[in-house]
Amino acid sequence: MKSLKSNTLTPDCLIPIEWEVATIKDCGHLLSEGINPQQYRDTDFIEYSMPSYDNGRTPNKCKGIDMNSNRTVIKGEVLLFNKLNVRQKRVWYINNAPKNALCSMEFLAYCSNKIDLRLLREILLQDTVTKSFESVSRGTSNSQRRIAPSDFLNFSFALPPMEEQHRIADALSSIDSLTNSLNEAILKKRQIKEGLMQQLLTPGHTNCKWVEKTGRELFSIGNGRDYKGLGKGNIPVYGTGGIIAYVDEFLHEGPTVCIGRKGTIDKPQYHDGKIWIATEGDGLHSI
């Protein structure tokens, strides 16, 4: 590692005096113990694979007989980095690998006592880092491109003192936890909405006080028209992808649901007020 005696410019930023420029190789090592699970046919293993990462980062429990290729043995705190198709950003932090834990050999399994692996994970997930690794990927097709272990180990970055690493990692982990919680809440709300809409649109399953009606009884349809001969103004013109211009005349005033005739037909848009709809769309107006 290179110690810096003064504030130093890296290609992207100015780093503090106390920080160092280091490579991943400077800070730790790759685990290299391999195993053929087929030789332990009845043994239960905990497998960290690409599919299990994509499935909510939940490792699989399986027997040796069910794994048809060699795996890497992982122990303790470890960071898994996908060398295959790095654009997928599969970077898996494991705080304490359980007994009989294995990972796919498409992962590089990295250990270190000089860098907080949670911080390294955040670094490796940055778009600029992904593009850097993509530029050195090798393979015969876009779906089978890999980086060499040396490409991973020689990657350099700015490294703060360990205490500061922990503070940064804690802060970023808190943000990740909050983001995950919000995403889970949004997913649950979306599922509730979809369930209610399914119930609403299923004949015979509505509330007994509700009345079933056709669309013809609830709204009229106004066709879109050409707007290019109109003057500029503050009235929005809606096309299939949203607002495309502002004009000085309107076709309708009031609540309107804009529906495209092609492309984004499954993404209706709502507007309340004066509106012009272009020729590629229609408007549903409440009766």
Image: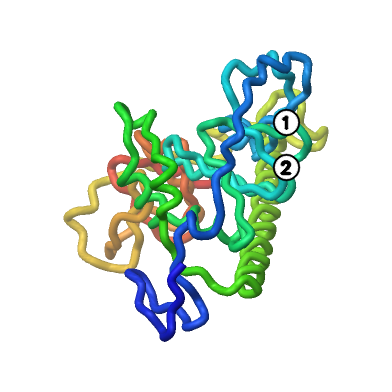
Q: Is residue 163 visible?
A: yes
Residue 275 is left or right of residue 118, and the answer is left
Kindly identify which numbered label has been placed on residue 253.
none
Q: Which residue lies under the disc numbered 2?
A: 97
Q: Amino acid at mark 2?
A: Ala
Q: Position of residue 118 (x, y in %)?
A: 62, 58
Q: Where is residue 274, by image quadrant?
A: bottom left
Is there CB contact under 8 Å for labels 2 and 1?
Answer: yes
Q: Along the line of sight, which residue is nearer the eye, 274 or 46?
A: 46
Single out the residue that lies furthest toward the left. 229
**Disc 1 secondary structure class:** strand
Q: Position of residue 6 (x, y in %)?
A: 41, 86
Give the residue drawn at x 42%, y 60%: 156
Give the residue drawn at x 47%, y 41%: 88
Q: Which residue lies under the disc numbered 1?
A: 46
Residue 145 is left or right of residue 220, and the answer is left
Q: Quadrant of the C terminus?
A: top right
Give the residue drawn at x 28%, y 59%: 245
Q: Amino acid at mark 1?
A: Ile
Single out the residue that lies furthest toward the right. 208
Q: Earlier in the sequence, mark 2 or mark 1?
A: 1
